[in-house]
Amino acid sequence: MISYIKKIIPLSWKTKLILFSLNKKSVSDFSFKVLNNKKRRIFIFLAADYGNLGDVAITYAQHKFLNIFFPECLVTEIPISKTLEGIAFVKKTIKPNDIITTVGGGNMGDLYASIELYRRLVIANFHKNQIISFPQTIDFKDDKKGIRALNKTVKTYSKHPNLTLIAREHKSFDFYTVNFPKNKIILTPDIVLSQNQSIPQTNRNGAIICLRNDKEKKLTNIQEVTLVNLLKNEFSTVTNRDTHIGGQGLGLKNRVGSLKLIWSDFKKSELVITDRLHGMIFCYITGTPALVFLNNNHKVKSSYFWINNAAHIKLVEDLSEISIKKALQEVKGTQTEIETKSFLKKYQPIIDAIKN
């Protein structure tokens, strides 16, 4: 009976009960450390400690970005698996000039409802501090469930007096502008594009397949088989690699090590085919030739806007064999050095938002 009751209790109720309990704990009882220093702090909530290397890369890049441009501040990650404990702990230790950030990505919406619930909780619990939501794709379905979820998010976000929402592509920027008029809205690329992992260059051999196998997949099984056969005719080796390694509550060393490993694998490959947004971005930042295919929402195509001049990355929307072969020949063997300095200027709105 007890297990049945637990199952039917909504997650939103459970989180409120847990937070109520955690708020009664003393600071010394939390797993987070109390640091005795006078530095201004920047917190990164919803930090990825699970096996999606795209989200791990976002957390990694966001942390690096904040360290580079705000060296006077102490940057602290709050893993998503410890969100509720993190909220309770930070509320007890935060100072008025400290800043809350939430990780960027593609999980703002009703597709990943639990993450959006956590984000709303973070925003609702820190009204006295500036909050920056790092570059996100927002996507709510246009049905009763999606509209109801959007209304909850709009209500929570709109109540915050100093919340900046950052879109990582124009479609999300337009959506923010229409639905969140009370919040500050800015537009920048996905934060992982601030990284340069192309040096040192290595010898390249073979091809890598990095395709989705989840609810965002758009390619059919027949189309995927056709792609694999084309690659086998062109390259000496063809291996499968995914940006999702599985697991929850992963330690920092484990997840960053896995991230560095996939970057290394891409740098050793002559070509990657992918329909994952961060598969495409990993290819860009490592200088790896890539054919990119669409997923079932707009985030791949919309984010391609920022790198559409890159000679080594080709978005393929026409899935005919002739079109794919042509695209393959256009990128195969492309040598690219990533120029980071000019690209970093695209993130100036984030720097300005935090400084102001």
Image: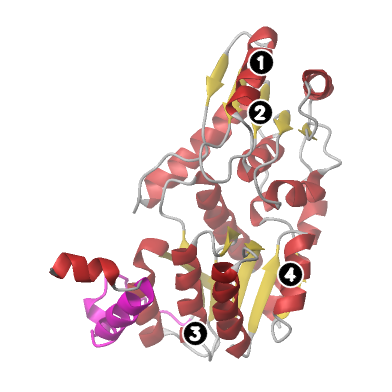
User: Of the residues shown, which amino acid type is indicated by label 1?
Assistant: Leu
Reading the image, the residue beneath label 3 is 124
Q: Crowdedness of circle 1 by 10 Å Cα count: few (<14), some, many (20+)?
A: many
| First reached walking from the N terminus: tag 3 or tag 2 | 3
Q: Which mark is residue 175?
A: 4
The residue that mark 1 highlights is 231
Report the residue at 49% width, 84% height from top.
124
Query: Which numbered disc flags the more N-terminal residue, 3 or 4?
Result: 3
Q: Are marks 2 and 1 in contact (CB under 8 Å)?
A: yes
- Residue drawn at the location 69% of the way across and 83% of the way down: 183
CA separation in Å, label 3 and label 4: 21 Å
Q: Is residue 28 magenta?
A: yes
Secondary structure type for disc 4:
helix
Alpha-carbon neighbours of circle 2 within 10 Å: few (<14), some, or many (≥20)?
many
Q: CA distance from mark 2 to mark 4?
A: 30 Å
User: Is residue 244 something that shows in the picture?
Assistant: yes
**What residue is disc 2 on?**
273
Q: Decide whether residue 39 is among the magenta residues.
A: no
| Kind of residue at badge 4 | Phe
Q: How many marks?
A: 4
Q: Earlier in the sequence, mark 3 or mark 1?
A: 3
* Residue 352 shows in the view: no
- Could you tell me how far apart the alpha carbons at marks 2 and 1 are, in whole angstroms? 9 Å
* Marks 3 and 2, how far apart at CA: 41 Å
